[in-house]
Image: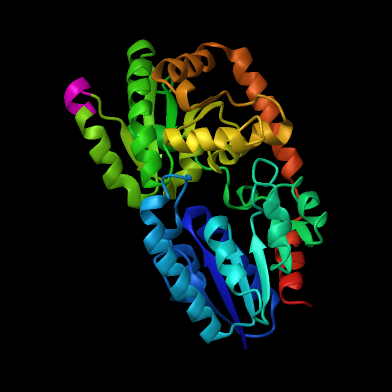
Amino acid sequence: MLKIMIIAGEHSGDILGSKIMHSLKNFSNEEIIFEGVGGPLMKEVGLLKNIIPFNDLSVMGLIEILPKLPKLINHLNNLTNFIISSDPDILITIDSPDFNFRLVKRLKNQNFSKFHIVAPTVWAWRPSRAKKISNFYNHLFTLLPFEPKFFKEHGLPSTYIGNPVLSYMQKGNKNFIREKFNYDDNEKFLLILPGSRSGELKRMLPLYIETSIKIIKNFKKIKIIIMVPDEKINLTNILINKYVSLFKYSPIVLSSKHKNDIFSSAHYALATSGTVSLELAYSNIPSVISYKVSGLTYLILKILVRTRWISLPNIILNESVFPEFIQSRCTVKNLYNSISELIVNDHKVLRQKKLLNKAMELLLVSNEVMEKTLPSIILKK
C-alpha cells in the first residue's frame, strides 16, 4: 500500500490533481491512499483527508496576499506537522508555488520523494526560483513545452507532460446557448469570463459589464453570457444587480460546469488572463484578454516581470494573438473598441483563429506521457 500526499489549490489544480490521481491508480499494481488538500474532483477520485480548506490556497497578487498571511502561515504550520507525522511515501504539490515551495522547503530533510506539477514562471519573473526548487524536489512536471530547459540547467529533472487543456476541453454542443434560451440563428454570443477568484470578479466584472452594455447598445444581435464557477454565481449576481436597476441590463450567468458547451456556442470572448486563454485557444474563440491588480502590486510586477505578454498563446508564439489590456489600459473604452473590431472585422477574426491553431499544435503530446511516463517517474517503475 502506498501513501501519497497531494496538495492542490484552486480550480485548475483540482482538475490537474484528479487527472494525476487517476493516472497513478491506473498505473500502479499497489493500492494507493491519497491524503492532502484538494477540491471536489480530487475527492471524487479518492482524496481521503482534506487537511486544510481547499479554497484558502487560491490567492493572487503581491499585496492582495497580505490580509491572508496569518491564515496561510497557520495552514503552513499545520500541514507541515501533519505531513511529517503521516510520513507518506510520496509528496506531490500542484501549482500554488508561494505556498507549496515554502511547504516543501520545510520538508527538505524528510525521506519521501517530492514532485511538483506546474513550473513556476521563471521565464517571466523571479528566475532564481529555478535554482532554489532544484534543491528540494526530485522531479518537476511542466505544462508548457519550453519550460524544462530552465530547470534542467540547475540539475532538476523536468518533463513536459502536455497541457491539461488538451484533455479536459472537448468539443461541445455549438447550439447549447441558442437552444437553452431560444435565441434566433442570426444572434451571436459574447462570452464574459471574469475569473474564478473572488478578487478577480470584484475587480474585473464591473468593467466587463459596462463594456457589454455598450456592446449590446451598438450591436443588436450580440447577446452577453457570463460564465463563472458554480461557487461564484451568487457573488456574480450580487455584483451585477446594480446594473439591472440602472440600465435594465441582466446578462445570463451560467456555471462553468457547462464549459465545453458554452465555449462551443460562443463567437467572441472577453476574458481575465489565466489558464482560460489556452481554453479559448483550444476552442478557437476570437478574444480580448485583460487584467488588473492593485496599484502597488502592479508597480512591483512591472519591475520584476520580464515577459512581454500575459496570455499564454501570445507567450507560446511570441506575438500578439489576443489583444491584451493590462492595468491602466484595462478600460471600458479599450475593451469595447477591441471587441468591436472583432465583431466587424472578419480578417482579424481569421488571423486570430489561424494563430490559435498554430499555438495549440505546439502543445500536442502523446497521451502516454500522462498515462505512463508521469506515473512511472513518480512511482519509480
The span shown in magenta is: 243-248
Q: Please state if 68 lies on the left or on the right of 89 as rendered.
A: left
The answer to whether residue 168 shows anywhere in this view is yes
Residue at 38%, 27% in the rendered image:
208
Residue at 44%, 26% in the rendered image:
190
Q: Main secondary structure of the magenta part?
A: helix
Relative to 131, say whether 43 is above or below. below
Q: Quadrant of the N terminus?
A: bottom right
Q: Quadrant of the C terminus?
A: bottom right
In the image, 139 versus 350, the foreground residue is 139
In the picture as drawn, the residue positioned furthest to the left comes out as 245
Residue at 81%, 56% in the rendered image:
152
Q: Position of residue 309 (x, y in %)?
A: 63, 31
In the image, 352 versus 221, the foreground residue is 352
In the picture as drawn, the residue positioned furthest to the bottom comes out as 1
Q: Position of residue 196 (x, y in %)?
A: 42, 46
Magenta run includes residue 90:
no
Q: Please state if 131 lies on the left or on the right of 52 as rendered.
A: right
Say which quarter of the image contains residue 139: bottom right
In the image, 166 versus 204, the foreground residue is 204
Say which quarter of the image contains residue 51: bottom left
Relative to 86, say whether 292 is above or below. above
Q: Please state if 199 lies on the left or on the right of 116 as rendered.
A: left
Q: Position of residue 348 (x, y in %)?
A: 61, 16
Q: Position of residue 333 (x, y in %)?
A: 42, 15
